[in-house]
Image: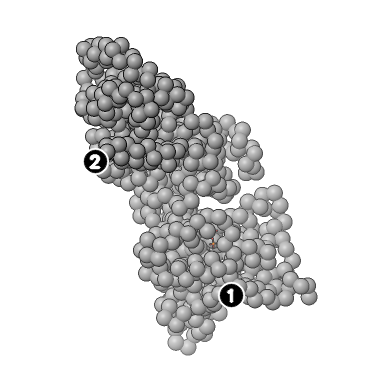
Amino acid sequence: MTATAQKETLDFQAEVSQVLNLVIRSLYSNKEIFLRELISNASDAAEKLRFEALSNDALYEGDSALKIRVTVDPEAGTVTILDNGVGMSRQEVNDTIGTIASSGTRKFLENLSGDKAKDSQLIGQFGVGFYSAFIVADKVTLTTRRAGMKADEGVRWASSGEGSYTIENVERTARGTEIVLHLREDEKEFLDAWRLRSIIGKFSDHIAIPVEMLKEAEPVEEGEEPKAAVEWEQVNRGTALWMRNKSDISDDEYHDFYKNTCHDFEAPLSWVHNRVEGTNEYTSLLFVPTRAPFDMWDREQKHGVKLYVRRVFIMDEADKLMPHYLRFVKGVVDSDDLPLNVSRELLQHDKKIDSIRSANVKRVLGLLEKLAKDEPEKYQAFWKEFGKVLKEGPAEDFGNREKIAGLLRFASTKSEGDVQDVSLDQYIERMAEKQEKVYYITADTLSAARNSPHLEVFKKKGIEVLLLTDRVDEWLVSHLTDYKGKHLQSVAKGELDLGELDDKETREKVEKAAEEHKHLIERVKTALGDTVKEVRLSSRLTESPACLVVDDYDMSQNLARVLKQLGQDAPMPKPIIEINLEHPLLQRMDSETDEDKFDELAKLVFDQALLAEGGQLDDPAGFVHRLNRLMLDMSA
Ligand code: ADP
């Protein structure tokens, strides 16, 4: 006997125990899903074998009729799920069943709140698959052999789900996996074969692998011997749902299919189902989920579209089928024309794939447009979950930039609270007469944006300004500079040019004042020295003494701050300070004859302006000292 053949008792990783407890507790009200999860794993294993066998026929070991069988043993109190799929080696069992290795899982655990309702939703977004067996079983035995390995390389894994499991090598001639659930005392209802059939019908009708159960014995006539032969019958429909005519498919069927194949516990928000004929024939069935997965911001976040070729599963997460900014879309693409042995590398350069991808994008964007138009509430729900991802679109997909821009939603000075529900079209439609540009402000938080001094003149004139406070917004506006012929203009950049909105007199007044106060401007410039690029009079301010802006082509102060927070050492753009002559503080400065005092005041005004837009002071202690001196001066 080899060392690895010995029976070992191993502790679950701490995380596994945690997940197990949670699964049992929070999914209890929905306990029948254990069967769906195990059948879906079995079906994945069968499809995996089919794929591996494409390049190595021997893996079939002479039996290519893939199937899943479910049996009950009322006396032993067990339900068994058997598949002749790819199976697992000892190493694989250890790696996949006893450990939770992915960083996604750790994040999942970090996100747990202890609130049952919330946590079970989280579970839904996260595949706990196999562990759901412990909802109904107090002991689970899994016996498996990897296709292509020898009979003495079978593996048995057993656990009562309480902290540890055993693993040993066993003889197993049949390839694939057998899972025996020893039902808990109060879960004996699952020994009823009809109950199981109805659960399979509900959840697993559309998995393409046949699920079989024993035919119920015919009632035996008196005096007759009961028939000994066992007969199996297929209990799921077993056709790939996406191949059926869409007019024959009910919403419920789509929902069940989605939950099954995309491993989500919640029904999808919406979907598109298309068959394309011609030189590149394929079917696509794409879903927009209701809720974002917890790992959507992981760099390695998986894409959700599976690739099939003529009904054969080829690969998960086919990222070539959907661009990154639509990575939340899940579903299936089944091609009639790609070769079965298509590899990831091949996908990179395949024209057919490119054309499927761009058609997919059009379909999803079209679906979202329709949702936004016909079901605005649903669209708002979508936006809350996925809006930030969609905002990556204009930078990534130049060709569809305008289309994506039409789907964006923002908070604005004309909307309430923190809802993002103003579209660019809506903005343009209600623009003031003579207004030529779409104005926006970027800031760290919504209140920093709403209360920023930069908005003062816009508020006074009743001009709407979009409030952009997601991190991705800076990225967005650097790629989306125009929409339907209107320029998108930051209110914190460049000279304020309200175009025709400004009356001639105001402009002349500012020019004249600048001329008259040349001396003051010079003094401020001397006091602030290198900290600023320029000092000028403001026409944006009505209430604040000063604000900071940057040149049109400089990086915005907010972006520089975001980059700094992300640990990137971006040089801070040198700001321009704009001062408001109407403000009494500036008038007081103008009459200050003591240059030291003037100097202090100028620095205070600068620091204030930085604070008011949500910036951070380089020398906060210096600011406090200056302020204190000023306060003491006042009381003296
Ligand atoms: P998920 O299916 O979300 O990955 P599971 O806990 O359901 O999570 O399963 C973990 C892993 O165990 C699977 O990814 C697969 O590698 C393996 N596995 C589970 N069931 C089977 C099976 N019947 N045959 C082969 N491998 C399986």
Ligand 1 neighbours mark 1 (CB distance < 8 Å): no
User: Would you say residue 347 is visible in this rendering?
Assistant: yes
In the picture, measured across the screen, residue 384 lies left or right of residue 461, that is: right
Q: Which amino acid does label 1 sit on?
A: Ser
**What is the x, y in percent for residue 351?**
58, 31
Disc marking residue 575 = none
Q: Quadrant of the C terminus?
A: top left
Labels 2 and 1: the sequence-earlier one: 1
At a point 47% along the width and 63% down the height, the residue shown is 36
Image location (x, y in percent) of residue 225: 52, 85
**Residue located beneath label 2 in the image:** 416
Question: Toward the viewer: 183 or 567?
Answer: 567
Q: Is residue 410 visible?
A: no
Residue 459 spot, x, y in % from top left = 23, 29
Q: In this view, does 95 lie above or below 161?
A: above
**541, above or below 219, in the image:** above
Q: Residue 442: percent from the left, percent from the top?
A: 37, 33
| In front of the other: 357 or 528 | 528
Q: Residue at x 30, y 40 (%)?
A: 632
View quadrant of ligand 1:
bottom right
Task: Name the residue that disc number 1 marks.
Answer: 164
| Residue at horizontal 72 percent and vertical 68 percent from the top | 153
